[in-house]
Image (spheres, rainbow, N blue to C red):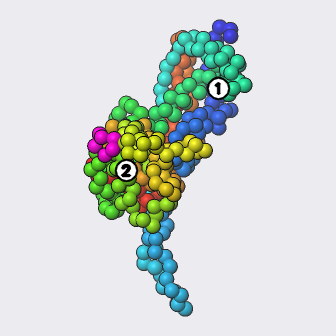
Amino acid sequence: MESIDLGNLVAGLEDRARESKSILMDNMIGSSDIIDYFRVMPGLLDEQPLTDFIESDEVMKPYKNIFEGTATVRPKTRTLKVRTTKVELEFEPLLYEKTFLSHNFHAKYKADTKQAAGFADFSMYILNVILQKVRYQLTENVFSGVYNPSGNTGKDAFDGLLKIVENDIAANEIPINNVFAVPELLSSTPVDVYNGLEKFFKLLPPRIWFEPFNLFVSPETMALYNEGFREVNKTNVWYDTYNRQFLLSGNGRNVRLIGAAGLSGTPRVILTIPSNLFFGFDTKYNMDFQKHDWKIRVLHRFNVGVQYGSSRFVWTNEL
């Protein structure tokens, strides 16, 4: 690789950001937990209504030859709010040149095992490194974020699910019957946590026990549950090898047990149906690159936010 021309590198970064938008967006959200657990809604600039059109499960009645409107069937709308977020970085390209060459050298000899992939050029390498960092933060902040416009960290950028759930409990948006008292989940004893998750699930209406669910817990709760499961059952926790996911124990259950990094430090658990979580972002993908002495400044701006479509399909525990 020849000596770096900062002017050419800036032009290359701008070209790559424009031409490879879909590849870069995939690197930012497509290879993370976001795409696995959220319905992605692109193109959002401010607010998007999420309509829970039929608020009640009861919509049928005996036939009569007259129209009788069902009073419980009415629109109920939640709003997915996206917030403008920015990334501002300054770096000296020369310091990363050898790392780039090392990565591509490794990828060349590991290509047959698919352990690594090379980059077309230095510009693409830099963009991917930046967006991978964004991806790691987003994966946590979709759960742990608390919007603070005067803040200086990624967690200040927008409200995550934990904050949204707390607000909705306080506002009685989440039905009181969906918030379970399970003191065992506040314990640090593995068997207590194992029994607590089992108890939590059995507090759901039995008619929906075998529906598909995602159960989000902290990494600490996940580890305690696994340890408690082994202690009680003398075997490892249930694991779906085909889909590479942990399952809550119980014959016939279809509950994915997910240790979410953004829930670290809280005993709060969040259970919902797979189609209920939404991740919104814009596709304008504003990236600007500026030469500044021997360094390059990266200015990246995008909108992002999360929400669930219906609070009726969210269950959690008392803290």
Identified at 48% across, 52% down, the residue is 255
Q: Is residue 210 above or below residue 119?
A: below
Visible in this render: residue 114? yes
Task: Give the farthest residue toward the bottom.
Answer: 65
Identified at 31% across, 46% down, the residue is 192
Identified at 52% across, 90% down, the residue is 64
Q: Is residue 108 above or below residue 114?
A: above
Q: Quadrant of the N terminus?
A: top right
Please name whichever residue, 145 or 223, is drawn nearer the observer in this view of the structure.
223
Sequence-first disc among 2 and 1: 1
Residue of label 2? 197
Please name whichever residue, 75 or 184, is drawn nearer the observer in this view of the structure.
184
The image shows residue 231 at horizontal and vertical percentages of: 38, 41
Please tell me how crowded label 1 is: few (under 14), some (14-19), or many (20+) other residues with Cα within 10 Å: few
Secondary structure beneath dot 1 equals loop
Query: Which one is closest to the eye, mark 2 or mark 1?
Result: 2
Please tell me how crowded label 2 is: few (under 14), some (14-19), or many (20+) other residues with Cα within 10 Å: many
Secondary structure beneath dot 2 equals helix
Task: Give the farthest residue toward the front.
Answer: 234
Is residue 250 inside the magenta stretch? no
Q: Give left or right: position of 204 versus 181.
A: right
* Residue type at the position of mark 1: Gln
Identified at 49% across, 60% down, the residue is 210
The image shows residue 124 at horizontal and vertical percentages of: 64, 24
Q: Which residues are magenta?
A: 187-192
The image shows residue 118 at horizontal and vertical percentages of: 67, 23
Per the model, the C-alpha gap separating discs 2 and 1 is 37 Å
The image shows residue 227 at horizontal and vertical percentages of: 39, 39
Q: Residues at badges 2 and 1 in contact (C-beta under 8 Å)?
A: no
* Residue type at the position of mark 2: Leu
- Disc number placed over residue 115 in the picture, else none: 1
